[in-house]
Amino acid sequence: MGIEIYSDEYFMRQAFMEAQRAYEEDEIPIGAVIVSKNKVIGRGHNLTERLTDVTAHAEMQAITAASSYLGSKYLKDCTLFVTLEPCPMCAGALFWSQIGRVVFAAPDPKRGFLEHGGYLHPKTKLEQGLLQAECSELIRAFFARKRA
């Protein structure tokens, strides 16, 4: 049985493909896509090493692309799908974008915004756990490779 097109799983798999690109580029494998009206309007993966920029997280890349696509700094009717819980910096950017919904796969107990008192816009819906095992395993494999 295939994945229903335009389902949350479909879009999280798109984010996972971005994470795989990051892995192949020796970046921490986190990927993100932003969706509006069942269309990916922004995508990104970590580029912190390539750009020598600590702010070049997957979510920031996707927010910039989506805002450019819409010609608006507000993403009220959009959903972010991201493979790891956003950090406080990215949560802040999501707050200011007023994004409608955030779906993340794996929690980040060390650096995630939920553990560090961060929050999203009051109207933003938050969901977690979709494809958690796959996304967590990619991150584990990346760091295992780094330590080897």
Image (cartoon, rainbow, N blue to C red):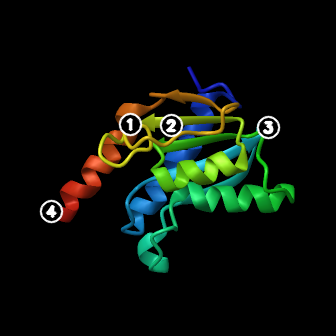
Q: Tell me which amino acid carries mark 2.
A: Phe
Q: Work out whether residue 78 or residue 37 is closer to the camera in this orientation and state it.
A: 78
Pointers 2 and 1 in contact (C-beta within 8 Å): yes
Spatial CA distance of label 3 from label 2 is 17 Å
- Looking at the image, residue 64 lies above or below residue 15: below
- In primary-sequence order, the first of circles 4 and 2 is 2
Q: Work out whether residue 50 or residue 116 is closer to the camera in this orientation and state it.
A: 116
Q: Which mark is drawn over residue 77?
A: 3
Quadrant of the snapshot with the C terminus = bottom left
Q: Which mark is drawn over residue 104?
A: 2
Q: Residues within 10 Å of mark 1 (few under 14, many from 20)?
A: many
Q: Is residue 16 left or right of residue 35?
A: left
Q: Residues within 10 Å of mark 3 (few under 14, many from 20)?
A: few
Q: Tell me which amino acid carries mark 4.
A: Arg
Pointers 4 and 1 in contact (C-beta within 8 Å): no
Spatial CA distance of label 4 from label 2 is 26 Å
Q: Residues within 10 Å of mark 2 (few under 14, many from 20)?
A: many
Q: Is residue 30 left or right of residue 9?
A: left
- Looking at the image, residue 37 lies above or below residue 65: above
Q: Residue furthest top?
A: 1
Dot 4: what SS?
helix
- The residue pinned by badge 1 equals 107
Across and down, in percent, residue 63 comes to 67, 56
Q: Work out whether residue 77 or residue 130 is closer to the camera in this orientation and state it.
A: 77
Spatial CA distance of label 2 from label 1 is 8 Å
For the point 84% across and 56% down, the residue is 72
- The residue pinned by badge 4 equals 147
Q: Is residue 4 left or right of residue 88?
A: right
